[in-house]
Amino acid sequence: MGGSGISAEAVALFARAERERFLRAHPRSVALAQRAQGHLFGGVPMHWMADWSTPVPLFVERAQGACFEDVDRHRYVDFCLGDTGAMFGHSPEPIARALREQAERGLTTMLPGEDAVICGELLAARFGLPFWQVTATATDANRYVLRWARAITGRKTLLVFDGCYHGTVDDVMVRWQDGRTVHRSGLVGQAYDLSSHSRAVPFNDLTALEAALAQGDVCALLCEPAMTNIGMVLPEAGFLQAARELTRRYGALLVIDETHTISTDIGGCTRLWDLQPDFFVMGKPVAGGVACGVFGISAPMAEAMRGVQQTIRDSSHGHGHSGMGTTLSANALAMHCMRVNLQEVMTEAAYAHMLPLAARLAAGFRRVIAQHALPWSVTELGARCEFQFCAIPPRNGAEAEAAFDDPLQMSLHLALINRGVLITPFHNMTLCCPATTEADVNTLLQALDSVLVELLALPNARMV
């Protein structure tokens, strides 16, 4: 189902010219990249920052709203938004104020304040799960929920969908391949066989899902309501409702990870689609860009967790939560910023602005693709949309991956950067925030159109 319709030779020629253009226009980024090699492994503070399309990392000077400026004083319209970490824009005024307020009142104490109580109330009202815990990241939240799921059910196997995204939890680093679970490619330093306690099945495949659950050893199905990291893949009608019914039938828990799909609605897909999870996970934007994650707990799960703790206390004098929590979890700064974010930033009004703009962008992508007669498709969900190099939107992770054309994708991203627009790296996803404007959307669409005009004008650009 893949096939971008553009020749590899034309892409390589186009990419070479765009790399030269970038290097000429970014002398300070080039200099900083060379300097960084001295003491930052790979020249960046986190390795994936070197995996973008640019020939050297793009060093940022400042970011505000829907835009940022690099050290060479180039301004960009940002549709990546920290891959959802800045989903409501860079440094929203209420969050900047909250940071100033809390900076003088203490950053971390290992003790709760009133902000924590209010955050619990706000989260419960918004997402429908009555109890909450706060972590440093969504990865941590998923890790701790998995511990609880195994303790509650007495089972060890975690079930995920092929191509899933749940942070860097070891247990999710698996793929489905020819009917069996294998390690994700590129996995470094793995000491044991993950397939002994993790299982992957294709998204939107109820037969495979039921077969995996019917083995009777699955503690939980951990899933995104729509896949977002392998390329956007939407659930087919009734699939998630059937997954909820099947997990209940076979005694497994349902964990919904909305770290990316929270862009769909103020209550996420969980509230919008009435998914009824046992646990709910979210991170990235929940504190307005300050590092924080949360997990919500249904009433039956809270009761089961208390039972687990009591059993541990009775049998070993332990406290019943070893292996969960870090010193900076639920720190005072994050709690204050989360409270302000939920009250003033992550609002109905914000979504009312973001969603129509994203729909406008998706329609524009379809129009540009049609004008250039390319065999591509567009997938959209809430404030997020993506163009994909396949004629029909993918229905599972394998189909989404089959549509990848890494050289083309990287060259398009670099060309957009050279024209003042940033989209999410590693695939072609975009996100609109409350500060995004119609002019910003038009800027992206015009840039993509001009890039495609130049690329397709190259000799033998179209594949026959």
Image: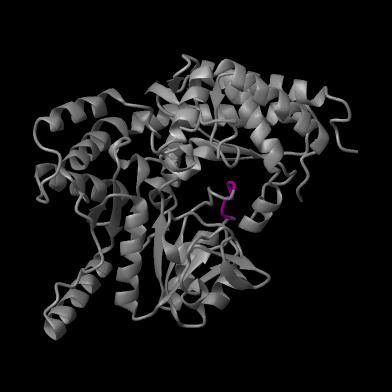
Main SS category, magenta section: loop
Point out the stretch of residues depicted in magenta.
231-235
Instruction: Name which residue lies at 52% across and 72% down.
Output: 199
The total number of labels drawn is 0
Q: Position of residue 463 (x, y in %)?
A: 86, 37
Which residue does the image show at 10% across and 49% down from the upper left?
A: 112
- Residue 255: x, y in percent? 39, 62
In magenta stretch: residue 232: yes
Q: Nearer the viewer, residue 357 or 161?
A: 161
State the residue lying farthest toward the bottom.
315
Q: Is residue 243 left or right of residue 303?
A: right
In magenta stretch: residue 147: no
Asked whether the viewer can see residue 441, the reply is: yes
Q: Is residue 356 visible?
A: no
Q: Position of residue 314 (x, y in %)?
A: 12, 83
Residue at point 26%, 52% (across, down): 135
